[in-house]
């Protein structure tokens, strides 16, 4: 099935056939910062079909028995800019809402959406979501930009539960 770009639904929200493939329950596996990891992800359309909400929870536990990592991610469409938008809130340092560049913008190329998160210190993280229609999987590719040179940070695959 060919994926077409986002369009207004006429009744609030937007329709996006690529993001429709992201909804459901997933197991994320791969490496983050060189360490093997497994996370569970639930993804659903929320707020009148305006956003996809991803709720990510690692299976690894911290010393208190809580998930070592958790995140809530919102993906949406900015009609004025004709770009995707992504807000990524997680348990790494609690400053997601305080950051001046908390929302990343992204463009689509086929079955990929590439986001650029800019840090206040001039750093950036390239995060690309790639849908693979044959096996119905997603890849998440994350690279840190260190003085103009990309360094791999995460290589992850999402498979349906």
Image (spheres, grey):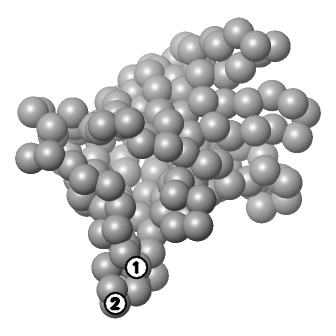
Task: Look at the image and tell me whether residue 101 can be seen.
Answer: yes
- In percent of width and height, residue 38 lies at 39, 33
Residue visible at 37% across and 75% down in the picture:
8
- Residue that badge 1 annotates: 13
Measured as percent of width and height from the top left, residue 81 is found at 59, 59
Q: CA distance from mark 1 to mark 2?
A: 7 Å
Give the side of residue 13 with respect to residue 71, left or right: left
Which residue is painted at 71% across and 9% down in the image?
Answer: 149
Q: Which residue is mark 2?
A: 11
Query: Which residue is at a point 81% across and 13% down the rendered structure image?
Result: 147
Residue 93 coordinates in the image, percent (x, y): 78, 46
Looking at the image, residue 124 lies above or below residue 27 = above
**Going by the image, does 19 lie left or right of 70?**
left
- Which one is nearer the viewer's eye here, 12 or 45? 12
Residue 44 shows in this picture: no
Please tell me in which quadrant of the rendered image residue 16 appears: bottom left
In the picture, measured across the screen, residue 81 lies left or right of residue 122, that is: left
Q: Name the residue furthest bottom.
A: 11
Contact check, label 1 and label 2, Cβ < 8 Å: yes
Viewer-closest of 71 and 62: 71
């Amino acid at each position: 099935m060919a994926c077409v770009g986002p369009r207004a639904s006429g009744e609030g929200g937007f329709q996006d056939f690529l993001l429709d493939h992201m909804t459901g329950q997933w197991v994320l596996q791969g490496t983050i910062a060189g360490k093997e990891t497994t996370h569970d992800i639930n993804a659903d359309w929320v707020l009148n079909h305006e956003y996809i909400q991803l709720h990510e929870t690692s299976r690894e536990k911290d010393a208190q028995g809580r998930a070592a990592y958790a995140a809530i991610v919102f993906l949406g469409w900015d009609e004025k800019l004709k770009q995707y938008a992504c807000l990524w809130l997680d348990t790494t340092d609690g400053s997601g809402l305080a950051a001046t560049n908390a929302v990343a913008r992204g463009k689509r190329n086929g079955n990929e959406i590439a986001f650029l998160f800019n840090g206040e210190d001039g750093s950036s993280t390239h995060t690309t979501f790639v849908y693979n229609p044959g096996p119905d999987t997603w890849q998440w590719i994350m690279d840190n930009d260190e003085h103009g040179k990309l360094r791999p940070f995460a290589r992850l695959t999402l498979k349906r539960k």
